[in-house]
């Protein structure tokens, strides 16, 4: 038996819930669909608001061949195969087939490049779906050939309309008496996501063996606590797992770090979200104890854009293990926070005159830059002079921690400054 969310998927625009600004009467997308002449476009919106459903409805209503690819599992080869299939199956006067690409933001540059020719010459009509801003995640040449339509989280009235419809019409649910006595928790946990709403209803109904199922705030909360539905990219489990991931890296446990990475990968987490957190961890937790960690984390982030998925999981794993196995230091993290606290405490202190820029004669006459010593003119490219404002010239901010890299840096600074560090 298919899950409720799949069984209840609308098949016509009249059954489609929400997004009235796009598919309501006389709306832009509705008019285009009714005309039978659609151009390539990208649907941008949060999960569970009907992007995939809308694409399928459009293909059915226009009676066009419909091909679908997932950016999570498909590569350039798969894209080219679909394009060749579309070419071979299309007759001269026939409208172009529709290619739907779910999570198109996960396609690498080369994968997106492989679509350009077919979209431009009309071999296919592209419908992409993304939860990320297409301006950042879709290459400019492809974006310029597509209209972008923004889908919104479903309103509470939309969700309750959907709930009433499935309770009345679903082949399984209509066999029992289901009453929604309270809907606050149902709507809160759904969070504008139709798929979540239907999953919650199915979970509550399946866990109740009685003929009459009463959906209340209490039953929804209890069932979700007992079964947190694996991994929810927008829910509490999402934050718990990323927290465990980062703390495992900070705690130098590569086994645990890779385990939590696998939980996120298996749960469909956005790889770029993971990569961003790795970059932050490299700076915050490894820091100056191993500056190469930040270089590797940044290379990981860049490589994901080039390689895509699923091979990107290997890059994430390599970086995770390297960071977890590296010596740790948060001295840079503490230094900037201490510096910000000092700025908050002391305000906008004036820059010492000898450090000021002097691009004009007037500034030079005011002694801007006077007395500044150019470090490279001195032995070891260093000469002692004051760089902090007068009021805080004796303050210490960065404190080296006890690791080989920072000990070496600290020893060098002590040699130069004769006691300051």
Image (tube, grey):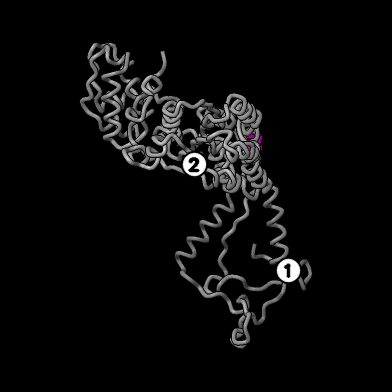
Q: Position of residue 200 (x, y in %)?
A: 34, 25
Q: Secondary structure at mark 1?
A: loop
Magenta stretch bounds: 318-322
Q: Nearer the viewer, residue 342 or 129?
A: 129
Question: How far separated are the C-alphas under marks 2 and 1?
Answer: 48 Å
Residue 367 against residue 352 in the figure, above or below? below
- Look at the picture and state if 350 lies above or below 295: below
Closer to the camera, 255 or 84? 84
User: Residue 195, image x and y in percent?
Assistant: 38, 28
Residue 41 lies left or right of residue 297; in this view the side is left
Look at mark 2 in the image and give the residue it sits on.
Answer: 132
User: Viewed as shown, does residue 88 lie left or right of 234?
Assistant: right
Q: Quadrant of the C terminus?
A: bottom right
Location of residue 73 with respect to 120 vertically, above or below: above
**Location of mark 1 (residue):** 382
Q: How many marks?
A: 2
């Amino acid at each position: 038996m298919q899950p409720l969310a799949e069984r209840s998927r609308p098949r016509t625009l009249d059954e489609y819930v929400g997004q009235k600004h796009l598919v309501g009467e006389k709306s832009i997308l509705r008019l285009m669909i009714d005309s039978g002449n659609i151009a390539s476009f990208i649907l941008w919106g949060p999960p569970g608001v009907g992007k995939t459903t809308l694409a399928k409805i459009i293909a059915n209503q226009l009676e066009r061949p419909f091909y679908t690819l997932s950016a999570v599992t498909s590569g350039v080869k798969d894209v080219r195969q679909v394009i060749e299939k579309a070419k071979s199956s299309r007759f001269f006067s026939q409208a172009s087939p529709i290619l739907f690409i779910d999570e198109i933001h996960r396609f690498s540059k080369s994968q997106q490049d492989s679509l350009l020719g077919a979209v431009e010459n009309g071999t296919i009509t592209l419908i992409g779906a993304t939860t990320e801003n297409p301006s950042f995640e879709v290459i400019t040449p492809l974006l310029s050939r597509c209209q972008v339509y923004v889908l919104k989280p479903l309103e509470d009235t939309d969700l309750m309309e959907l709930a009433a419809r499935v309770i009345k019409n679903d082949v399984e649910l209509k066999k029992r008496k289901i009453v929604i006595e309270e809907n606050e928790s149902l709507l809160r946990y759904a969070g504008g996501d139709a798929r979540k709403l239907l999953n919650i209803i199915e979970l509550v109904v399946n866990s109740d063996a009685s003929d009459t199922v009463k959906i209340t705030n209490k039953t929804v909360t209890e069932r979700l606590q007992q079964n947190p539905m694996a991994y929810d990219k927008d829910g509490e489990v999402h934050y718990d797992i990323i927290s465990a991931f980062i703390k495992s890296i900070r705690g130098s446990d590569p086994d645990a770090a890779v385990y939590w990475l696998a939980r996120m990968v298996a749960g469909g987490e956005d790889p770029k979200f993971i990569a961003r957190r790795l970059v932050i961890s490299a700076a915050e937790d490894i820091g100056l104890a191993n500056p190469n960690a930040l270089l590797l984390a940044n290379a990981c982030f860049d490589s994901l854009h080039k390689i895509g998925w699923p091979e990107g999981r290997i890059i994430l794993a390599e970086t995770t293990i390297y960071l977890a196995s590296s010596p740790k230091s948060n001295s840079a993290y503490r230094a900037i926070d201490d510096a910000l606290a000092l700025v908050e405490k002391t305000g906008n202190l004036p820059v010492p005159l000898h450090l000021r820029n002097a691009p004009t004669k007037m500034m030079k006459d005011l002694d801007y830059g006077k007395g500044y010593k150019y470090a490279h003119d001195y032995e070891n490219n260093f000469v002692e002079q004051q760089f902090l404002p007068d009021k805080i010239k004796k303050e210490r901010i960065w404190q080296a921690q006890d690791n080989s890299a920072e000990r070496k840096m600290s020893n060098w600074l002590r040699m130069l400054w004769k006691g300051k560090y």
